[in-house]
Amino acid sequence: MKDWREFRKQGRRAYVIKHGVLLWGLSSAVIWALVMQYFDPSDPVWLRPLIAAAVFPAVGYFVGLWTWRKKEAKYHQEDGAGRS
């Protein structure tokens, strides 16, 4: 939980943008676009990356919120248990 304390100092918004939108969203977009272009190259080469760049970071926002909430719940659970 030591690392989580550092993330908490940066705030929820920074965590969601960095870990949800940028790390999860953009990496998923690149991987999906490359895999889809490899297995089904019927669409123009620019179309899938364009779609992926819009959809995956948007989903990543919610992934970031979800992971923030899960980690916060775990942090508060462990913090409360440590104080007893």
Image (cartoon, helix red, strand yellow):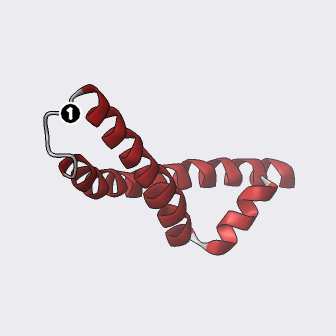
Left or right: 8 as drawn, with respect to 39? right
Residue at x 77%, y 54% (from the top left corner): 79
Give the x, y percent position of residue 49. Answer: 28, 51
Q: Nearer the viewer, residue 51 or 73?
A: 51
Give the number of callouts. Answer: 1
Label 1, on which residue? 41
Q: Nearer the viewer, residue 83 or 39?
A: 39
Residue at x 74%, y 66% (from the top left corner): 6
Give the x, y percent position of residue 2. Answer: 81, 57
Q: Nearer the viewer, residue 23 or 65?
A: 23
Give the x, y percent position of residue 75. Answer: 70, 53
Left or right: 72 as drawn, with respect to 84? left
Residue at x 41%, y 41% (from the top left corner): 31
Identity of the amino acid at label 1? Pro
The answer to whether residue 59 of the structure is visible from this angle is yes
Residue at the far left in the pictured view: 43
Left or right: 25 as drawn, with respect to 58? right
Please rate how many residues cluster around mark 1, counting C-alpha atoms within 10 Å: few if below 14, some from 14 to 19, many from 20: few
Residue 11 in which image quadrant: bottom right
Please tell me whether residue 10 is drawn above or below residue 75 in the rendered image.
below
Q: Secondary structure at mark 1?
A: loop
The answer to whether residue 84 of the structure is visible from this angle is no
Give the x, y percent position of residue 4. Answer: 71, 58
